[in-house]
Amino acid sequence: MWASSWLAGFSAPDDVIDALSEWAPMHLVVAGDEGTADATDLAWPGPRADGVASLLTTIRKLLPTDRKGPGIELLLPRPGATTELPRGTEFARHAVHAGQAIVVGDPEGPGLGLVPTTEGPDVLRWTVFAIDVPPRAVRDFGLGEAEYAMREAVRGAADALGSLQSLPTRTALGDPRTRIAAELAELTRHRYPSEMSERALRVLESADRVAAILSVAQHSSPTEEPTAGSAAAREELIRPLWNAVRSARLGAVSASIESSVPRR
């Protein structure tokens, strides 16, 4: 979203760098293979601590100012849901393993795939691949549908936790309410571009709230020793909620990126 804001002329490069520094003080950038290194002048096989600035330079070289589309897209792939990835590529394998990626370039043209991975509490590594950009993914629903789905998901998460009895008030892991608050604080500490719509912001805030509850639930010990059946029941309840979070995040980010119109 910050890269899109910068490309559209709403934000300066320093705004992008400052926003991403909240994710990690140090950003390592490396080409995914020798061909990508030759095409982008990025380091290979080992990374350089060039930071976000080198990523912005690489993106700007690829995207013309008179491009027709947004030129950048967030992907949140997972096993069994990889249709938006170029098949059989190293980028696709890295993206699925990380569960997140960014595609830069016009659909069905040459572009880049960026995969971020955490290498420590203060280090984020960006692996860049030269790719043929696949067609833009068709989102499950727009902002209105996403906002409604998140309202339902908040209630669904609370109902699921109650039926699973997975959050006793006292466990070795601590009070679940305190842990949910801590998870939510971590998810919401990042800033968004000022031109972002209030509806998109509400969708992302609701998605963060559901994600915090689900994250704590998945790592909490149930009140009784789990069985194969109870574990399957828990997964059956939680999976649709995670899918809703994923779709809502993609929808909100995609809508915000597409609403950014480059300033001429």
Image: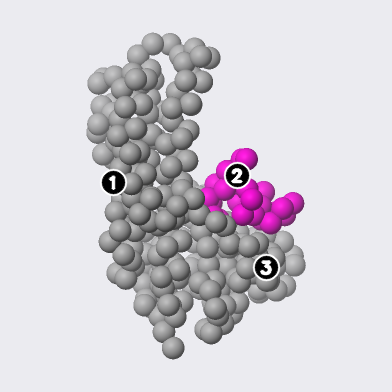
The reply, left or right, for residue 106 in relation to residue 33 is left
Name which quarter of the figure residue 163 lies in: top left
Q: CA distance from mark 3 to mark 1?
A: 39 Å
Residue 81 bears which disc, if any? Answer: 2
Q: Is residue 84 magenta?
A: yes
User: Which three-letter amino acid code belongs to the residue tagged 1?
Assistant: Ala
Residue at image location 61% in from the left, 71% down from the top: 106
Q: Depth-wise, is mark 1 or mark 2 nearer the camera? A: 2
Q: Which residues are magenta?
A: 75-101
Of the residues under marks 3 and 2, which one precedes in the sequence? 2
The reply, left or right, for residue 76 in relation to residue 175 is right
Q: CA distance from mark 1 to mark 2?
A: 29 Å
* Local secondary structure at mark 3: loop
Residue contact at pointers 1 and 2, CB within 8 angstroms: no
Front-most of residues 149 and 167: 149
Q: Position of residue 234 (x, y in %)?
A: 45, 23
Q: Position of residue 144 (x, y in %)?
A: 35, 54
Residue at image location 61% in from the left, 54% down from the top: 84
Binning the other alpha carbons within 10 Å of mark 3 as few (below 14), some (14 to 19) or many (20 upward) gives few
* Local secondary structure at mark 1: helix
Front-most of residues 124 and 58: 58
Front-most of residues 241 and 17: 241
Point out the image quarter for the C terminus.
bottom left
The answer, for residue 79, to whether it is visible in the render is: yes
Residue at image location 60% in from the left, 77% down from the top: 62
Residue that badge 1 annotates: 185
Of the residues under marks 1 and 2, which one precedes in the sequence? 2
Residue that badge 3 annotates: 108
Point out the image quarter for the N terminus.
bottom left
Q: Position of residue 130 (x, y in %)?
A: 68, 66
| On screen, residue 43 above or below 169 | below
Q: Name the colour scheme.
A: one colour
